Image (tube, grey):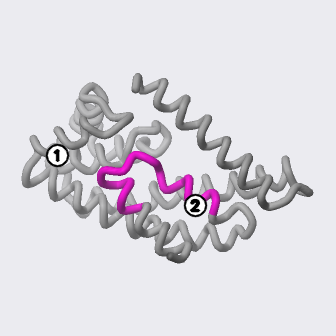
């Protein structure tokens, strides 16, 4: 499976029920050749939008089962789901603009946006740039940080350090989320 297909699949999977962000794959895809990573971001965005559409529809048609499914995903809790619902209820679309900086899964916003009555069109108009900017930022940062810190090291060393970095990130994330 090629880099772009994996990015598309991972974007969809994480936007639905998978709990590891596509940024992991995107950072690996762009660690040596930035252009490869940037192109993969577009495919991850496509997958994320498909997955977000699925979650939005699920949240609209069967909100209780969508919430239950979210609550069973590692790193997601009922208080977090409620918090996102409250943010969308109080702030509306503005809550979506801040979402990528909070580390809160996109899938929660998709389900809660549908539950709060936010129009799908508006949800996706905000989701497109916010997701793409975050994907690009992760890919750019990773590429340049690895080359700045480990420039003369082998590609395998950079991959090892990157993998180690993601493991540490997820250990800290799940510890913070109480999982």
Question: With respect to residue 96, does 175 lie above or below?
Answer: above
Picture quadrant where residue 56 is located: bottom left
Image coords of residue 160 (percent x, y)? 72, 50
Which disc is residue 26 wearing? 2
User: Label 1, on which residue?
Assistant: 66
Could you tell me if the residues under marks 1 and 2 are in contact, i.e. CB atoms within 8 Å?
Answer: no
| Magenta-span inclusion, residue 24 | yes
Label 1, label 2: how far apart the Cα atoms are:
27 Å
Image coords of residue 53 (percent x, y)? 25, 62
Magenta stretch in the rendered image: 11-28
Left or right: 101, with 70 as reference point? right
Residue closest to the eye, 1 or 116: 1
Report which quarter residue 25 is drawn in.
Answer: bottom right
In this rendering, position of residue 117 left or right of residue 46: left
Which numbered disc covers residue 135? none
Task: Classify 72 as above or below 18.
Answer: above
Mark nearer the N terminus (1 vs 2): 2
Q: Is residue 159 magenta?
A: no
> Could you tell me residue 142's position as x and y percent?
69, 53
Relative to the observer, which residue lies in front, 32 or 131?
A: 32
Q: Residues within 10 Å of mark 1 (few under 14, many from 20)?
A: many
> Vertical placement of 71 versus 29: above or below?
above
Q: Position of residue 46 (x, y in %)?
A: 40, 70
């Amino acid at each position: 499976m090629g880099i772009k297909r994996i990015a598309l699949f991972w974007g969809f999977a994480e936007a639905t029920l998978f709990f590891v962000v596509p940024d992991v794959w995107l950072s690996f895809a762009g660690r040596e050749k930035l252009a490869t990573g940037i192109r993969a971001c577009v495919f991850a965005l496509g997958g994320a939008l498909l997955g977000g559409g699925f979650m939005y529809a699920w949240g609209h048609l069967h909100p209780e089962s969508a919430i239950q499914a979210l609550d069973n995903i590692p790193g997601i809790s009922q208080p977090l789901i409620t918090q996102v619902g409250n943010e969308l209820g109080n702030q509306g679309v503005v809550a979506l603009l801040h979402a990528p900086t909070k580390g809160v899964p996109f899938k929660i916003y998709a389900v809660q946006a549908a539950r709060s009555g936010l129009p799908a069109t508006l949800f996706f108009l905000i989701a497109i740039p916010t997701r793409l900017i975050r994907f690009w930022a992760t890919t750019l940062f990773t590429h340049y940080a690895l080359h700045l810190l480990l420039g003369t090291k082998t590609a395998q060393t950079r991959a090892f350090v990157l993998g180690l970095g993601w493991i540490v990130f997820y250990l800290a994330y799940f510890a913070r989320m109480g999982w």
